[in-house]
């Protein structure tokens, strides 16, 4: 007879205890349950262009299909040479200095590279400055990697630009790096050159590494242009992230990249760490890598995403106007990306738990949003709206949010 040990409860690793990623959290589980019951929910919760009719350009899909037979093997750990060459040319267009093919790492989306870049860098006690609100994967990756996430405020009164004084106040001898998300998720802010120059000056004064998440750098409205912060910092060590998910509506292809630029002389050891982590996961998915050269070098039709009269711009205008028309709701107009981050007046809406608020909205009106605290915002007075659904759905959703808030006020 074999001995059988009694089964013990299986706990998650303590590494995960403080890690938080609410975009796919408990409210989404409830939404799935409601859908299983046959209810139709209007989803303004995830920046995934394809399900809303923003499909990848035809040429990318054809090239990927054509390359499928070659794509069944592993690639170089850093990625296909031709794809990295195309990325190198893109960094040249964006004036990012000192980038060769060896300075480029392709990953399974930017997500994998965010985690990898933090895992390779941080020791216990190291601090990383992150924006509040932020794209929460950054905070999660810092925490998972044993570092401390320190949030600097972005100023809603100033178009959600980073508050430089707040950044200065929060720098300590343990600060290693500063993360800049531009164009920003969740606020839609696009930082002008003066702001970027100030950020570079702070990094220079304190010897900080810059991590620039620029995954929305082609999703721009109102004629604004985007500058890569790395182009202003040839004397600093900068890691810039970008990919196909948003600019080329190819989130499911999982094709992202990370570029190290500027002064690499002091970063040899860190780069060795990045190389090791890239090798340990062998390579990024190869079919997705085959899409990169075609996307960057070929067909550039992102017009329906960005043109002033394009679908996305019209949807942004509609959602922004309808939100601002609601009593006690104010919203900065986004200049880029797929999101806006409206504010609820605290007197009219004395919310204590914004996740509960979002859950009630879902239950009562079948509209799905993400609460502001899910983006490491410190007060329960914001939520994020994704404006990817078509105008009919957006109008319907805004009407339902308005009715829900009317009900909240008269409670
Ligand atoms: N960075 C930001 C700011 C994002 O908003 C997202 C996705 O929403 C990502 C990174 C992850 O993108 P990817 O699909 O390349 O993993």
Image (spheres, rainbow, N blue to C red):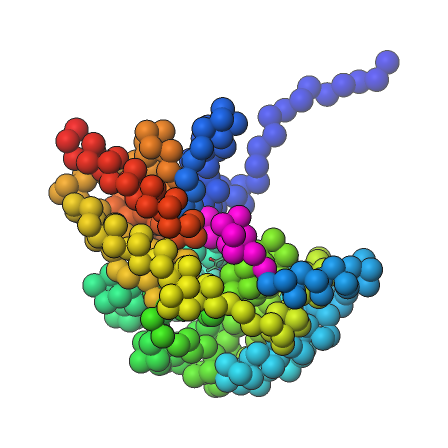
Q: Can see residue 283?
A: no
* Residue under the point 16% across and 35% down: 409
Is 347 on the left or on the right of 15, as rendered? left
**In this picture, which residue range is highlighted in magenta?**
46-56
Q: Is residue 49 magenta?
A: yes
Main SS, magenta residues: loop
Q: Is residue 104 above or below residue 74?
A: below
Dividing the picture into quarters, in which one does residue 268 lie? Answer: bottom right
Q: Which residue is at the front of the view, 293 or 234?
A: 293
Residue 222's spot in the image, x, y percent?
34, 71
Residue 193's spot in the image, x, y percent?
35, 80
Quadrant where the N terminus sits is top right
Q: Is residue 217 above or below residue 403?
A: below
Dividing the picture into quarters, in which one does residue 187 lie? Answer: bottom left
Residue 128's spot in the image, x, y percent?
43, 63
Q: Which residue is at the front of the view, 323 or 194?
A: 323
* Residue under the point 51% across and 61% down: 246
* Residue under the point 43% across and 49% down: 389
């Amino acid at each position: 007879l074999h001995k059988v040990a009694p089964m013990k409860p299986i706990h998650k690793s303590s590494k995960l205890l403080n890690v938080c990623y609410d975009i796919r959290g408990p409210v989404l589980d409830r939404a799935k349950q409601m859908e299983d019951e046959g209810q139709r929910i209007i989803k303004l919760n995830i920046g995934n262009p394809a399900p809303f009719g923003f499909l990848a350009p035809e040429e990318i899909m054809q090239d990927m299909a054509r390359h499928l037979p070659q794509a069944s093997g592993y690639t170089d750990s850093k990625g296909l040479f031709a794809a990295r060459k195309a990325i190198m040319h893109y960094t040249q267009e964006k004036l990012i200095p000192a980038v060769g093919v060896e300075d480029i790492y392709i990953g399974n989306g930017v997500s994998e590279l965010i985690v990898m870049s933090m895992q390779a860098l941080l020791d216990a006690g190291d601090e990383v400055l992150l924006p509040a609100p932020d794209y929460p994967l950054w905070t999660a990756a810092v925490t998972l990697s044993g570092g401390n996430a320190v949030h600097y405020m972005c100023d809603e009164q100033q178009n959600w630009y980073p508050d430089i004084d707040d950044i200065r106040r929060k720098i300590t001898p343990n600060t290693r790096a500063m993360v800049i998300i531009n164009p920003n998720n969740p606020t839609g802010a696009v930082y002008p050159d003066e702001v970027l120059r100030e950020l570079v000056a702070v990094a220079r004064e304190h010897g900080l590494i810059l991590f620039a998440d620029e995954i929305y750098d082609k999703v721009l409205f109102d004629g604004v242009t985007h500058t890569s912060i790395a182009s202003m910092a040839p004397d600093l060590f900068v890691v810039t992230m970008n990919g196909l998910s948003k600019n080329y509506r190819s989130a499911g292809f999982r094709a992202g990249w990370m570029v190290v630029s500027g002064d690499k002389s002091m970063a040899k050891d860190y780069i060795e760490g990045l190389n090791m982590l890239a090798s340990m996961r062998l390579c990024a998915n190869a079919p997705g890598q085959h899409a990169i050269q075609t996307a960057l070098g070929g067909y550039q039709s992102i017009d329906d995403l960005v043109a002033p009269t394009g679908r996305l711009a019209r949807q942004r205008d509609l959602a922004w106007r309808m939100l601002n028309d609601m009593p006690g709701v104010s919203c900065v107009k986004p200049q880029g990306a797929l999101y806006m981050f409206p504010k609820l007046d605290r007197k009219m809406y004395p919310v204590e738990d914004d996740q509960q608020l979002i859950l009630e909205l879902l239950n009562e009106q079948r509209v799905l949003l993400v609460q502001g605290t899910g983006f490491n915002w410190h007060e329960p007075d914001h939520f994020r709206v994704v404006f990817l659904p078509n105008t009919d759905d957006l109008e319907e959703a805004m009407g339902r949010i308005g009715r829900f808030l009317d009900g909240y006020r008269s409670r």
